Image (cartoon, rainbow, N blue to C red):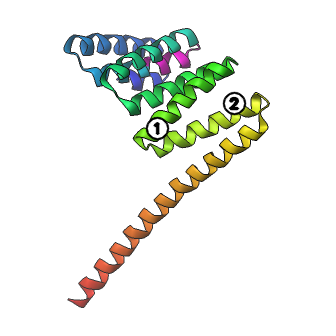
Amino acid sequence: IGRLHRLQKRYDEGLDCLLKALGIFQRVRGMSHIIDTYEELGYLYSSIDLPDQAKNSFLKGLEVGKQVKSIGKMARLHLELGLLYKKENELELARENIQASLDHSLKSQSLSNIIRAYKELSLIAEESGDFEQAHQLYKAYTAAKDSLYSQAYNQQWAEITTAYENEQKEQET
């Protein structure tokens, strides 16, 4: 519900819901939900231009994520932290967090996170003046993006082929 309030730009109501949810999840030790709630708090604080509170929320989510070894969630949180640092022109902290996101994303094989991380690392390298590194990271970004599109294409092709074959079998009977 807190997320919906945030998306509808009803930030006070969203904050209230998320803080209540966090309290409940902490009492029942719902670790996965605690991480998600901290992530949502980070998004909400980012939406209302409170970057320090956003970073604090993402960092708390990371602490819990490390305890329960939630690699996928840690990848998202590191990426969001990196984006906040990048926005504040703290490029080294941005690079460290986005690199951590990439490392976790590679372990969890989250292609969408891998794509985002490579793209952001490429942009940071470019902003830092390391054009060779930016080019290499951009090539990795492009390869990952092409892989995602190829997977989607192959899945669609398999679905079409299966539907066609099923239709042919039905017509034969």
Image quarter where the N terminus lies is top left
Question: Which mark identifies residue 124?
Answer: 2
**Secondary-structure class at tag 1:** helix
- Mark 1 or mark 2, which has the lower sequence index? 1
Image quarter where the C terminus lies is bottom left
Q: Which residues are magenta?
A: 41-50
Say which residue label 1 marks. 105
Q: Is residue 89 left or right of residue 158?
A: right
Q: Is residue 103 visible?
A: yes
- Between 165 and 167, the one lying in front of the other is 165
In x, y percent, where is residue 100? 52, 28
Q: Is residue 10 visible?
A: no
Q: Amino acid at mark 1?
A: Ser
Question: For residue 159, which quarter of the picture?
Answer: bottom left
Question: Extreme bottom residue here?
Answer: 172
Question: For residue 165, which quarter of the picture?
Answer: bottom left
Looking at the magenta stretch, what is its main secondary structure?
Answer: helix
The answer for how far apart the CA atoms under marks 1 and 2 are is 18 Å
- The number of numbered discs placed on residues in the rendered structure image is 2
Residue at 34% over, 73% down: 162
